[in-house]
Image (spheres, helix red, strand yellow):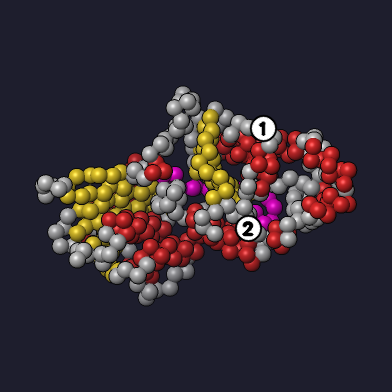
Amino acid sequence: MTNPIIIEADGGSRGNPGSAGSGAILLDSVTGAVLGEIALYIGVATNNVAEYRAVLAAIELANEIAPEARLFIRMDSKLVVEQMSGRWKIKHDAMSELSVLVAKAIGNRQVDFEWIPREQNTRADALANEAMDAEKSVVRKFVSADDTQSIRVISSLESASSLEYNSTLPSSVRAPKNVKSPLTTLIMVRHGRTALTETHRLSGRGGEDPQLSELGILDASNVASELLKVGVTGFLSNVEAPSVIVSSPIRRTRETAEIIGRQLGLPVEVEEDIAEISFGEWDGHTNAEVQQKWPVEFENWKGDISIAPPGGGESLEEFDKRVQEGRKRILSKYSGQTVIVVSHVMPIRGFIKTAFASDWPSYWRISVAPCSMTVLRFWGEEAAEVTCTNYVGHQ
């Protein structure tokens, strides 16, 4: 029978909200052996969010080390202990979402939460401060060697996704390594669904400007839950946690960004030049309707990047110039940070086009689903790297 595991967890924030870190230690309850240590740097967050993230990361590690073991989670946060025990109501959106992730991680296993005085939680506190001091994350797993009773480190964030991943420079050996600009990571998120999205109708800048539908609100909530994991667990655990959200000015993107912002506790800024391309008189029509009503204009538009839709639309050439200016401003203003950029199909394709150093076909060869995630890394204009496109695992 697997011995129960004691988890001591803590989180801290220097500013509340401010630079935050989470710490946890996993112990065999019978032998006292250290099974794992977690020091997570999570960027700008509150103390409470950092404490919840410590619990989530610790349970995820326990699920890997001993999935059948009973867990005794000890914290000096009365709030988290009482909320996770079901005795106190959770009112903050970010903590509510994190509590859902913690509950999913727990599943059917037995878990007990216990409050302990701060002076009995010094090891977890030290790990949280280790993360804040280094501004880096580390997970250390320990195991007894076969021929001794000693403990040795066997892993330090060595997942398959991190084996060929350089956290500060371009990863490929052929990529430039003498870049002077700091790494800026952009997590591109397309807005959630609207009534026009669901009926396959064109919807651009200057058009009807619809709000999110019920399904679109669900899309935004789902992607927010996935974004909570950035820098903590999952396929983006090795990415620094986001510090700001930048949104297109169009209503559906602002609504999506606001849902994400509430759940992550992040501010939302607006960048005008990452709005969707303008379709002019074609806005609100399906492609089939446009082809039927404007057959000549439609065929000319498809074959020439300098031709704009009638009635004030934008040509692809004009649009690309605009969206690249928006991209440059984001990279300049938020240099060195991880930024969630909430935009549309065409602007996201434009960012990918530049990251790939590709040509115009990028605008019609890349799928971008509602509330999908595309992760791009830029070192100013010196280098770029594509981590993933159109990720929809959270849907």
Q: Nearer the viewer, residue 4 or 245?
A: 4
Residue annotated with mark 2: 192
Of helix, strand and loop, which one carries label 2? loop
Residue at figure coordinates x 88%, y 43% from the top left:
296
Rendered location of residue 165, percent (x, y): 42, 37
Q: What residue did someone put label 1 on? A: 359
Relative to 68, 212 lies left or right? right
> Which residue range is magenta in the image?
238-255
Q: Which mark is residue 283?
A: none
Q: Residue 92 in the image: x percent, y percent?
A: 47, 65
Q: Amino acid at mark 1?
A: Asp
Mark 2 or 1: in front is: 1
Q: Is residue 10 visible?
A: no
Q: Quadrant of residue 240?
A: top left
In the rendered structure, does residue 394 fall within the stretch colored magenta?
no
Name the secondary structure under disc 1: loop
Please give the name of the residue rendered at 11% of the width and 47% of the height, measured from the top-left corner.
148
What's under tag 2, amino acid-wise?
Answer: Gly
